[in-house]
Amino acid sequence: MSDIDDHIWFTRKARIFASERLLSNNKHSQYILIYYSLLNVIISIYSTKYELILGESTSLHLIIMATSILVLSLIVSNMDYKRKALEFKDNYINLQLLLEDKSIHISLKWKKYCELLKQTDNHAHIDDLMFRVLNRHTLTSRKPMKREIAHVYLYRLAKQIILALIYLWPLFAIFTL
């Protein structure tokens, strides 16, 4: 594989991981907003019969939760994960087409590669690391170092813990009041 093909191939793979990460972020953010909204509605309905379900300040807690959900939904919609994921997908498909085009001269291939890089935001460093670490046994170049492998596994663990805490936080808050 030539130097340019190596660059294109690794960039394409990192963009695939970026697209998947953004789609996962979109899915979880939507689930969390729905989950929080549903809990807020359930508690609101339940509080019509049992006014002190969350203590003397039940109404205040529900207003704070509803306002927080509204603000979070505005933030999530402005993040636009799905659009960014689709941009990455279009980009990595175009990178694949460029990689497969054997009729193009190397200097023109570099130029087209740079143009494709300009078409979308750059992927996060973790996207490149994730691909390289998870596929390290099949790579012939850019094999990850031990600290990069540790970084990826710590990142994945931290992400799972944070997601679990986000999903469990409302239940913890309800049952500790």
Image (spheres, grey):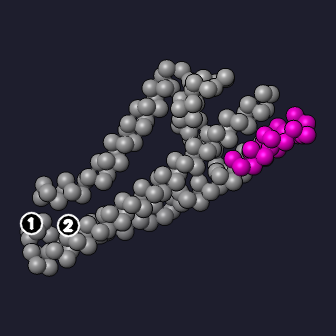
Tag 1 residue: 55
Kind of element beneath mark 1 = loop
Does 161 sit left or right of 107 as displayed?
left
Question: Which residue is at a point 14% across and 74% down the rendered structure image?
Answer: 47
- Write the start and end of the magenta stretch as one range: 92-113
Kind of residue at disc 2: His
Question: Which residue is at a point 67% across and 38% down the rendered structure image?
Answer: 11
User: Of residues 135 and 53, which is closer to you in this image?
Assistant: 135
Earlier residue among tags 1 and 2: 1
Where, quadrant-wise, is the N terminus in this rendering? top right
Q: What kind of secondary structure does the magenta stretch mostly adopt?
A: helix
Kind of residue at disc 1: Gly
Disc 1: CA contacts within 10 A as few (<14), some (14-19) or many (>=20): few
Question: Residue 96: within the magenta?
Answer: yes
Does 94 sit left or right of 85 as displayed?
right
What is the x, y in percent for residue 160?
37, 43
Does 56 sit left or right of 39 as displayed?
left
View extreme (front): residue: 138
Kind of element beneath mark 2 = helix
Question: Which residue is at a point 34% across and 45% down the rendered structure image?
Answer: 162
Residue 119 visible here? yes
Tag 2 residue: 61
- Check if mark 1's residue and mark 2's residue have beta carbons within 8 Å: yes
